[in-house]
Image (cartoon, rainbow, N blue to C red):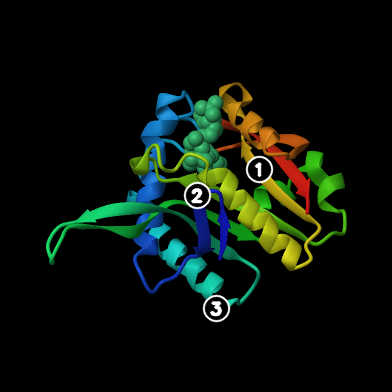
Amino acid sequence: MSTSNKFHTRNATLANDDVQFIIAAFDSTLPYLASIGAGGMWGEQPFSQKDGFEEDTVDSIRKSEQNEDPSKVMIAEVETSDHVEGGERPQDAKVLTRVGAAVILDSLPSYLRAREELKAEIEKEKKFLYLEVIISDFRTDPLHRGAGAALIEAVKGYGRVNKYDTLYVDCWAGNGGRLNRYYEKLGFNHVGDFSFKRASGETWPGTLFSVDL
Ligand SMILES: CC(C)(COP(=O)(O)OP(=O)(O)OC[C@H]1O[C@@H](n2cnc3c(N)ncnc32)[C@H](O)[C@@H]1OP(=O)(O)O)[C@@H](O)C(=O)NCCC(=O)NCCS
């Protein structure tokens, strides 16, 4: 689909095991998040053990593939060499290793739409995309590094080609706002802060960001 530095991005497909890749990549983020003090972001339960997670992932990829709506599931890959023995002489074969994934929608989730503090922004009439999630596969460390930025560039490209005005993303603002700084470094602008109570009773602090396309 597109290439940025060493990364290739493409739409996810049900024709291979992208579903299993995405679920395993989500799982791989949990030990990383815990290690940087961000365990509160997604909790401890592996995504592979969450009811309905696999079905939802399949559904998202199906919609993305069928162009039913603008939602897209994208995969970032890196070309690596694999040493292949056998044949007349050993050789290096090029292989694509998946290192990250992103999901985009063209609507905001209800927990954002319901926020009084974001009302002024949300009621603006503009054509926007919402980056629902972005993940790297930490099993591929250090190959994945930079995959997040490459996926965001690919999402922006998709948005521009399809005449969207704005890309939104929201993130967990805990842990001293470290993830906020990641998005700021990538050019996103602070729109507003919000928080909500999780089923566990804990408060989940968040920030909404946007970037013009
Ligand atoms: C965000 C992410 C996709 C970026 O992927 P990447 O291009 O492979 O980049 P890196 O993993 O090298 O991380 C980039 C920087 O963001 C930081 N970062 C990543 N996720 C973070 C998080 N959840 N909280 C705080 N900081 C985070 C990293 O520590 C790193 O900072 P550094 O450069 O100061 O070390 C990836 O780090 C990831 O999957 N994080 C966990 C899941 C997540 O937070 N997704 C975003 C919300 S949906």
Q: Is mark 2 within 8 Å of ligand 1?
A: no
N-terminal label among 2 and 3: 2
N-terminal label among 3 and 1: 3
Q: CA distance from mark 1 to mark 2?
A: 27 Å
For the view shown, which residue lies furthest in the top direction? 176
For the view shown, which residue lies furthest in the front direction? 88
Q: Position of residue 30 (x, y in %)?
A: 40, 37
Which disc is residue 66 wearing?
Answer: 3
Number of numbered discs overlaid on the protein picture: 3
Q: CA distance from mark 3 to mark 1?
A: 26 Å
Kind of residue at badge 1? Asp
Residue at the image position 73 percent from the left and 66 percent from the top:
161
Above or below residue 91? Residue 111 is above
Query: Mark 2 — residue?
Result: 6
The secondary element bearing badge 3 is classed as helix
Q: Position of residue 140 (x, y in %)?
A: 36, 43
Q: Position of residue 137 (x, y in %)?
A: 40, 45
Viewer can see residue 199 = no
**Label 3 crowd (10 A; few <14 / some 14-19 / many >=20):** few
The secondary element bearing badge 2 is classed as loop
Kind of residue at badge 3? Gln
Residue at the image position 69 percent from the left and 55 percent from the top:
156
Which disc is residue 170 wearing?
Answer: 1
In this rendered view, identify the residue nearer to me: 187 or 60. 187
**Label 1 crowd (10 A; few <14 / some 14-19 / many >=20):** many
In this rendered view, identify the residue nearer to me: 97 or 25. 97
In this rendered view, identify the residue nearer to me: 128 or 156. 156
In this rendered view, identify the residue nearer to me: 52 or 143. 143
